[in-house]
Image (tube, rainbow, N blue to C red):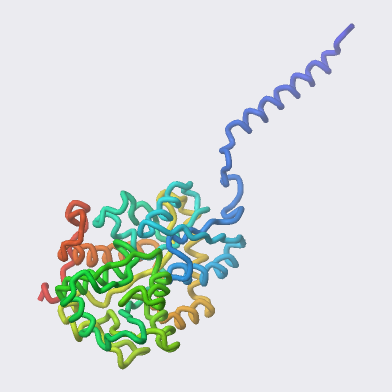
Amino acid sequence: MKFRPTVIYLSLISVLLFLTACNSLVFLPSGSHEKNPYPSTSITGVIPWGAGGSTDSLARAITPLVEEELGQSIVLTNKPGGSSAIGTHYVHKQGADGYHLLFSAENPALYGVLDISDLGFEDFDPISIYARGIATVVVPADSPYQTLDDLLRDAKARPGKVKMGSTGPGGLPFVVGTMINSAADTEFNMIPFDGDGPALTALLGGHLDASVTVLSAAINNAEAGKVRILTVVNDKPVEELPNVPPITQSLPELEKHLPWGPFFGVWVKKDTPEPVKEKLIDAFSKAEQDQTFQSYLDNMKAVPMNLHGEEAVAYWREWQSTTAWLIHDDGAAKIDPVKLNIPRKQMESESR
């Protein structure tokens, strides 16, 4: 049997092409999104707090607008626990490719000083800090406490007996409770929950004496006759509650720390490619300017921030400095801020 040279030649070429193709497939990154422009598939958004709280509500408000800009869905999932550390760790374990977003409040800025986790905002890049809240102290509508001074007097008289809702170390109620304890020499019994929403539910159920929540939740429940707002954590009254005194009326020592409040935004794992971050920043920036989201912030009584990139980093680092040292000075810090390279913010009154 004779073999024609042409047939042999073509067969060899076919074999070489086949082997080349196989070799290329071997080196394609498994499960990689690099072949397609970002985003080529749906994105996971992790909320490290329970449903119904401020972090959750804001994430669900802005997400549909971001989806329109990206042309892909963002599947939101709640992973509460550990003062938001469980959800934060989950995102950090994923790839730095922009397909897992962390919708967070301010808590990771305090993980180090409270020895909650070896992670922190330092391990993520901010896409956007889109809102800031104003905190309030509330009690049930039928509470015997008519004023903040009433609450403080009872807390002083019964150390560790007056129950205040908390979201664990580093959460909004924890920090406000620390502020109050430091300035008023009180000791509240802080009861932890997986978000300010569940804490407020416990308050309304008669399981707490007081709680700390954001302005919108306080106003909504006060208008429904469910809570009484004792104070706003601010250095002056707020427009929405002209008859509710600022906390400095009872505790003027706190003025140097104010204005202060929780903030909310979205982060990606550090080392996420710049083009991916730029795409996300552009999408969130446009969503933040949408009238739908602006109206939502107005209804929530939240302050629009619209901070991205280095501006966002500067903002959370300044917040971290103020709050970490406040916690340290009250004796609640587990690790000295100096060891974490957190500078002490110089107050205006100290620099005069």
Q: Residue furthest right?
A: 1
Q: Residue at x 16, y 82 (%)?
A: 252
Exactly how many numbered labels are in the figure? 0
Q: Quadrant of residue 156?
A: bottom left
Foreground residue among 34 and 321: 321
Q: Residue furthest top?
A: 1
Q: Residue at x 26, y 66 (%)?
A: 318
Q: As drawn, is 154 to the left or to the right of 204?
A: left
Residue 11 seen by the camera: yes
Q: Quadrant of residue 116?
A: bottom left
Q: Is residue 334 above or below residue 238?
A: above
Foreground residue among 113 and 202: 202
Q: Position of residue 165 (x, y in %)?
A: 33, 71
Residue 236 seen by the camera: no
Q: Position of residue 243 (x, y in %)?
A: 30, 93
Q: Quadrant of residue 169?
A: bottom left
Q: Position of residue 76 (x, y in %)?
A: 53, 61
Q: As drawn, is 276 to the left or to the right of 352?
A: right
Pick the quarter of the image with the N terminus. top right
Q: Residue at x 40, y 64 (%)?
A: 194
Pick the quarter of the image with the C terminus. bottom left
Q: Is residue 112 above or below residue 260?
A: above
Q: As drawn, is 311 to the left or to the right of 62?
A: left
Q: Residue at x 19, y 57 (%)?
A: 337
Q: Position of residue 239 (x, y in %)?
A: 35, 89
